Amino acid sequence: PTSSFPTFIIEAVFKPIEKLSGECWELCTFKYQDKEILLVVTNDNISMITENNRVINIMNGSVYDIYQSRLDPARIYVGLVDGLTSLYYQKGNWVKEKQIEGIDASISNITEDFLGNIWMGTLDQGVLKMNIKSIIDKRIDKVEIFKFDTIHGLPNGQTIVSEISGRPYIGTSKGIYEFLALQNRFEPDSSFGIEFADGSHYIHRISKINDKEIWMVTVAENSKNKYRIGY
């Protein structure tokens, strides 16, 4: 039967948030205890958005990426144009920790493996891995930094790191690479299809919904459909 009620079409729209006029590089939903806070990375700072859309600046600087630690969820790792630092959420305030020594690369994105190692993609210096050796009073004390580049099997260019099933996978200019821990090197990975291991696809972005749903932005120079989003 035909309904006598009028049909309403509701169109979703985006509305700008005041005081956020710059480029938005990253969004992160920070979940800690009973808190859920939206963090926004712009081209010159990190801000938090309150429930009533109030914008609060929590850190200035040129930031590429932020990542909430699983080892200590109160910590947010911050990928900078010249290294790595972190923010620690304590008693309702954000505490900026010291920049990690031994890392001066532009950190384009960050992830974490099942052992708690921090993996970092860079713009032009391969892949970095940080192992935290000690923590004192909830602050990172001693770390060990490992650097991987063409000597370890990676191609030149920007690298994108993503954790899938607890393991790091690397998006590169020549496809997806996996880390072989026993050999301490990287090799092309065909888990998502041979086209991602034959050097034909440049991996621009990787986003994991869950271990079975992975989204990628790729560029295939010799393909009719050069730019693709999906997978």
Image (cartoon, helix red, strand yellow):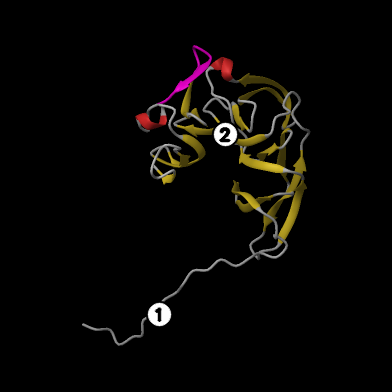
Q: Give the x, y percent position of residue 42.
A: 68, 51
Q: Which residue ends up furthest to the left in the rendered image?
A: 1
- When asked about the image quadrant of residue 14, the answer is bottom right
In the image, 198: left or right of 16? Answer: left
Q: Are discs 2 and 1 less than 8 Å apart at CB?
A: no
Query: Label 2: which residue?
Result: 111
Q: Earlier in the sequence, mark 2 or mark 1?
A: 1
Q: Quick check: 27 above or below 163? A: below
Marks counted in the figure total 2
Mark 2 closeness class: few <14, some 14–19, many ≥20 residues within 10 Å = many
Q: Residue at x 66, y 64 (%)?
A: 17
Amino acid type at circle 2 is Thr
Q: Quadrant of the N terminus?
A: bottom left
| Residue 11 image point, x, y percent | 46, 72
Q: CA distance from mark 2 to mark 1?
A: 43 Å
The front one of 70 and 20 is 20
In percent of width and height, residue 73 lies at 61, 39
Q: Toward the viewer: 164 or 91?
A: 164
Look at the image and give the residue range highlighted in magenta: 180-189
Could you say which disc has been placed on residue 220 in the image? none
| Residue found 53% across the figure and 28% down from its top | 113
Identify the amino acid type marked 1: Phe
Q: Which mark is residue 8?
A: 1
Q: Position of residue 76 (x, y in %)?
A: 66, 40
